[in-house]
């Protein structure tokens, strides 16, 4: 979720407090999803759709490429998406992306046959490279209570999901933590050891709920090898534990080839240097550049798949369902609520 992104107008959403259900949602009979071979089905072709319930409550509808109204998740499945990523906020000012909303979306995704990733922001609002604000209920906590809060909150959310039959395949301990999280206590450039302890708190909580859950440390700018070496050298030196190195990649139509190549080099270095698997947890491009976006996505998916011994785990598009929403322009649906050709990359 890089700072260049106009994810919101930016950072405080106009939450739709009075709306509690989906307006006029019409769900058509499900069509059989594309058939994948077993190797391809293990590769995550993902989408973060954390805004979905809020969009539906605001009256947004979604249509397949023929113009037929369908459930958004079904449209994504038909485009080859097999995994859903959901952000989790501790106590948002509206219900969106709070624990109840996360559970609702996770149930939908699970029931539709998707793998699930939970992206813990450890904030009440957006966490990214330049914003890592503490939740309001944690704001006066010292370092040790903050570390314990990371554990308890992570454990409680994942336990709730598990009690509802959902064991996420992956979680992120923090979102785009280029300089740590829960500032100032967990600011990595000043307190790398504290940030490492926060990572371990989230890691240990996930494993306590279910040892199969894979834990991701996620930072932005997947082409920036210096940033990645600095962060993961620091975490390793301070005893942090993680399973997967996650990255974001948001190129433009005129530079995606070079950034994809740099990202591949960075992924190769991460695997060699730390022996960890890698994943592109966020990707996107302007919806007006749908051809370039398809080319970019096809290429980066191919590059991640090319990594040796299955060390490249997948690629997630960030909020493809967005159209005419929150001034966000990197979705992959057009103004008619239909998927653009960008998503064709996930069908291949």
Image: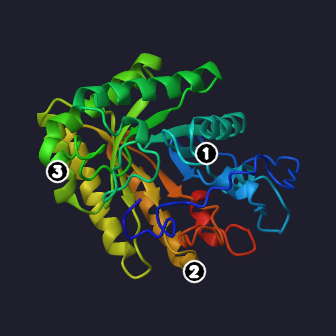
What residue is shown with label 2? 288
> Disc 3, disc 2: CB below 8 Å?
no
Lower sequence index among marks 2 and 1: 1
> Disc 2, disc 1: CB below 8 Å?
no
The image position of residue 129, as x and y in percent, is 31, 57
Towards the viewer: 181 or 227: 181
Looking at the rendered structure, the secondary structure element under dot 1 is loop
Question: Relative to residue 108, is residue 223 drawn left or right?
Answer: left
Lower sequence index among marks 3 and 2: 3
The image position of residue 174, as x and y in percent, is 37, 43
Q: How much space separates mark 3 and mark 1, taking CA atoms?
A: 30 Å
In the figure, 342 relative to 184: above or below? below
Disc 3 residue crowd, few under 14, some 14–19, many 20+, Cα 10 Å: some
Lower sequence index among marks 3 and 1: 1
The image position of residue 235, as x and y in percent, is 18, 38
Looking at the rendered structure, the secondary structure element under dot 3 is helix
What residue is shown with label 3? 229
In the figure, 59 relative to 200: above or below? below
Looking at the rendered structure, the secondary structure element under dot 2 is helix
The image position of residue 90, as x and y in percent, is 48, 38
Disc 2 residue crowd, few under 14, some 14–19, many 20+, Cα 10 Å: some
Towards the viewer: 346 or 150: 150
| Badge number at residue 82 | 1
| Between marks 3 and 1 in the image, the one whose residue lies nearer the viewer | 3
Give the quadrant of residue 13: bottom right
Give the quadrant of residue 253: bottom left
């Amino acid at each position: 979720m890089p700072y260049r992104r106009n994810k919101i107008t930016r950072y405080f959403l106009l939450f739709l407090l009075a709306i509690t259900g989906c307006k006029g949602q019409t769900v058509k009979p499900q069509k059989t999803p594309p058939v994948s071979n077993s190797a391809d089905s293990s590769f995550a072709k993902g989408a973060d759709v954390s805004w979905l319930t809020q969009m539906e409550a605001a009256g947004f509808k979604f249509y397949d490429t023929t113009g037929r109204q369908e459930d958004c998740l079904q449209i994504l499945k038909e485009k080859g998406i097999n995994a859903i990523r959901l952000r989790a906020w501790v106590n948002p000012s509206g219900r969106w992306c709070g624990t109840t909303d996360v559970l609702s979306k996770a149930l939908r995704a699970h029931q539709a046959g998707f793998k699930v990733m939970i992206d813990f922001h450890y904030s009440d609002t957006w966490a990214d490279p330049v914003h890592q604000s503490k939740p309001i209920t944690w704001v006066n906590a010292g370092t040790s209570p903050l570390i314990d809060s990371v554990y308890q909150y992570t454990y409680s959310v994942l336990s709730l999901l598990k009690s509802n039959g959902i064991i996420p395949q992956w979680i992120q301990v923090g979102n785009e933590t280029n300089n740590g999280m829960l500032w100032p206590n967990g600011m990595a450039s000043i307190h790398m050891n504290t940030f490492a302890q926060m990572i371990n708190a989230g890691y240990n909580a996930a494993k306590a709920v279910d040892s199969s859950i894979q834990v991701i440390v996620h930072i932005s700018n997947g082409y920036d090898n210096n940033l990645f070496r600095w962060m993961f050298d620091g975490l390793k030196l301070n005893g942090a534990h993680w399973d997967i190195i996650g990255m974001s990649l948001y190129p433009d139509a005129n530079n995606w080839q070079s950034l994809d190549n740099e990202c591949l080099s960075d992924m190769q270095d991460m695997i060699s240097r730390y022996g960890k698997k890698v994943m592109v947890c966020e990707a996107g491009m302007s919806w007006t550049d749908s051809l370039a976006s398809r080319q970019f996505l096809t290429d980066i998916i191919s590059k991640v798949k090319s990594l040796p011994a299955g060390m490249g785990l997948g690629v997630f598009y960030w909020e493809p369902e967005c159209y005419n929403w929150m001034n966000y322009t990197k979705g992959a649906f057009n103004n008619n609520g239909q998927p653009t050709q960008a998503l064709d990359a996930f069908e291949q």
